[in-house]
Amino acid sequence: MPRGWTRHALNNGTIFGATYRGVGALPPLVSHAIGRAGTWLAWRLMRETRAAIADNLRALFPDEPQAMLERRARRTLGAYACDVIDFIRALQDRDDDVHRLFDYVPADAELFFNELAKGKGIILVSGHYGNWEAGGIFLRRVMKLPVAVVALPEPDPAVDRVRREIRERIGADTIQVGQSLDTALQIRRRLAANSIVAFLMDRHVGRDRVEVQFLGRRAYFQRTPALMGFLTGAPLVPSFMERVGRSRFIVRAGVPICVERDRPRDEAIQAAVQNFADQLGARVRAHPEFWYHFYRYWDAQKSGE
């Protein structure tokens, strides 16, 4: 059965493919105008999605009325549309131009080189927050660093095909979960080669999960990144990409997380995952409009879906 977070209407081949082709062919002003119109239509017509986003945001704004939360949902949809448009357009930019998309504190950029200098690779961890896909462009085309993305296959083959094409254009490898029995070995090989392996950690997959407190509620995050950190000694480096204007993003590196190997394994993994949940939660509290879950996130935590 497809999981709840893959079934929403924004994740089908027709919409995703049309957006990918259309944005690549249209001038930026036209793309953003269509994006604004599409946001309004989605907010008006996709009632369940609108209500789901509002329900997710209630963890942050428990005293707000439903109407206000649904207005916040419109801002979330608008931010997501802008992020998608700018990401797709960035795929076409020359290397000299793509630098202009990103602002960053030099120390945050240097952090990646400093961690790689230790020779154990980096497990880059993020969540469905901000323009995480533009982070791949930053690492590959600005920083010139090797990246492999760990990803589940999309239930819609058209969406899966486009996402693979996008990663190939960026120059990022894909480690596809469930396609072979050696996923963990592939991850370990990349880390042994001192590469970056990237995970979105805030959605668990079946039994691959660790219970955490997130935004004051119980949630389950993915276990594998912290397990790989325990087994290899590679640090988990939280990273977030936040919009600061049209076609402008700021790169925010979090505090590296070392999974303590001198503690019992499960205890060390839980502590590391909770650390990441705390760092992600701080970013979500600062910019809730960038938190992109278009299904009832908290219900999925209760059901284990």
Image (spheres, helix red, strand yellow):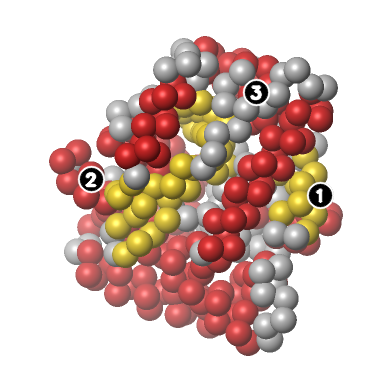
Alpha carbon distance from label 2 to label 3: 32 Å
Nearer to the camera, 131 or 262: 262
Helix, strand or loop at label 3? It is: helix
- Label 3 Cα neighbours within 10 Å, binned few <14 / some 14-19 / many ≥20: many
User: Amino acid type of disc 3?
Assistant: Met
How far is disc 1 from disc 2 in space, using C-alphas? 40 Å
Is 151 situated above or below 220?
A: above
Quadrant position of residue 166 = top left
Residue count near mark 2 (Cα–Cα under 10 Å), binned few <14, some 14–19, many ≥20: some
Mark closer to the observer (3, 1): 3
Query: Could you tell which of marks 1 and 2 lies nearer the N-terminus?
Result: 2
Indicate which disc, 2 or 3, sits on the residue closer to the N terminus: 2
Q: Are marks 2 and 3 in contact (CB under 8 Å)?
A: no
The residue to which callout 3 is attached is: 228
The mark that comes first in sequence, 3 or 1, is 3
Q: Which of the 4 image quarters holds residue 111? A: top left
Residue at (35%, 62%) from the top-left corner?
A: 244
- Look at 29% across and 64% down and name the residue there: 246
Which label lies toward us, 1 or 2?
Answer: 2
The residue identified by callout 1 is 304
Dividing the picture into quarters, in which one does residue 9 lie? bottom right
Q: Which residue is mark 2?
A: 98
In this rendering, is residue 148 above or below 199?
A: above
> Percent x, y for residue 58?
69, 72
Viewer-closest of 129 and 1:
129
